[in-house]
Image (cartoon, rainbow, N blue to C red):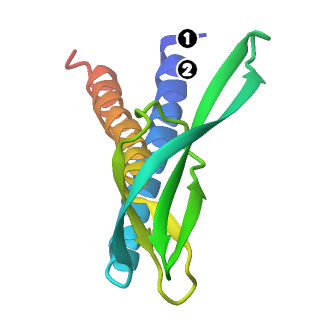
Amino acid sequence: MTEVGILIFTGFVCILFMGVGILGIYRKVKFSERIRTMHTIIGVLVDYDVAEKRDENNDIVTCYFPIYEYEWGGETRRLESTTSSLMKKGRKVHILVDPQTEKAICLEGEKESNSLLLIFGGIGVVVFILVLLKAAGVI
């Protein structure tokens, strides 16, 4: 592959990363709007749902999905996270509950996933700038 081809390919990958970052910003804005109508409750991490999957090298990867308990409407409810985490059992977390739909999310888990998207976007911007500087002959 020529140097121009490498720059084009790298630029394309950077644009994908920046797209992920834009998705992170969009999710953060939408989450900020939703949080205004939700009630915050303290929940506790009580257990993990353990799932084993195989990666591209056929190695077994173990994922730990937290299960939280919280009180809502006079009853104890459980919330299973869709984001793998290694928080300690017994840790208190903030559970956000929509009073109309009674759907709940864990604030800490939501922040983690949004932050990860923003980090990928930041990496895309930095590398894209470096590619542009390289193409311009500055570096």
Kindly identify the amino acid type of the residue bearing the numbered disc 2: Gly
Q: Quadrant of the N terminus?
A: top right
Quick one: which residue is furthest to the bottom in this view? 100
How crowded pointer 2 is (Cα within 10 Å; few <14, some 14-19, many 20+) is rated as few
Q: Are marks 1 and 2 in contact (CB under 8 Å)?
A: yes
Q: Is residue 36 above or below residue 14?
A: below
- Which of 136 and 77 lies nearest the eye of the viewer? 77
Residue 117, x across and y down, in percent: 43, 45
The outermost residue toward the left is 138
> Is residue 81 left or right of 123 when viewed as pictured?
right
Residue at the image position 55 percent from the left and 37 percent from the top: 84
* Depicted 34 relative to depicted 8: above or below: below
Frontmost residue, 53 versus 115? 53
Where residue 17 appears, x then y in whole percent? 46, 39
Quarter of the rendering containing residue 75: bottom right
Residue 103 is drawn in which quadrant? bottom right
Label 1 sits on residue: 2
Answer with left or right where residue 37 lies relative to residue 82.
Answer: left
Tally of marks: 2
Residue 5 circle label: 2
- 47 vs 93: above or below: above
